[in-house]
Structure formats: structure tokens, C-alpha cells
Image: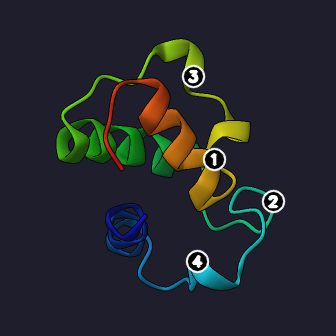
Amino acid sequence: MGKIMEILKEIRPEFDFSTSENFIEDGYLDSFDLVTLVSELDSVFEISIDGLDIVPENFETVEAIANVVRKNGGAI
């Protein structure tokens, strides 16, 4: 999960993701950020996240993001 937190901090360094229970609702990530995040996750974890998995619910928390990475073949 550390890699995911590092990626989130690179994308939006102004936010403390450890204090948020929902990155989308709290305004930490917008649609552009999700595109950037998916690209970074694909690169770092050497996966290709399925387009059907790119929905806000899958990016609300670190655990949700980790689940998407695992589902698409990434090792956390």
C-alpha cells in the first residue's frame, strides 16, 4: 500500500490522503487525477487496468485502489 500512497502524494502533494475516508467525496481526486492515477498504477505495477474498473468507487480509498490493482494482476 506504500507504493499507492507514494503515487497519490505525487499526483496531489497538497493533500494528506491518510486523513481521508473517501478521496472522491473529499475532493482529493477529480476525473483528470483518476486518468493520471490509472496510468501511474499501470506503469508501477506493470498491469493494465480494465476500462470497466475505472469508476469512482474503485478509487475512493487506498484499500479500494489496492483491490483494483490486485484484480488486474498487480502484486501489492
Q: Which residue is mark 3?
A: 53
Q: Which residue is mark 4?
A: 17
62 relative to 40 in the view: left or right: right
Mark 3 or 2, nearer chain start = 2
Q: What is the CA distance from the residue labelled 3 to the residue labelled 2?
A: 18 Å
The amino acid at mark 2 is Glu
User: Are there few (<14), some (14-19), or many (20+) residues within 10 Å of tag 3?
Assistant: some
Q: What is the CA distance from the residue labelled 1 to the residue labelled 4?
A: 13 Å
Mark 1 or 2, nearer chain start = 2
Q: Give percent across and percent down for residue 9.
A: 39, 75
Q: Which residue is mark 1?
A: 64
Mark 2 or 4, nearer chain start = 4
The amino acid at mark 1 is Ala
37 relative to 24 in the view: left or right: left
Mark 4 or 3, nearer chain start = 4
Q: Nearer the viewer, residue 10 or 76?
A: 76
Circle 1 SS class: helix
Which one is closest to the eye, mark 1 or mark 4?
Answer: 1
Mark 1 or 4, nearer chain start = 4
Q: What is the CA distance from the residue labelled 3 to the residue labelled 1?
A: 11 Å
Q: What is the CA distance from the residue labelled 4 to the residue labelled 3?
A: 21 Å
Q: Give percent across and percent down for residue 53.
A: 57, 22
Which one is closest to the eye, mark 2 or mark 4?
Answer: 4
The amino acid at mark 3 is Asp
Circle 3 SS class: helix
Q: What is the CA distance from the residue labelled 2 to the residue labelled 4?
A: 12 Å
The amino acid at mark 4 is Phe
Q: Which residue is mark 2?
A: 25
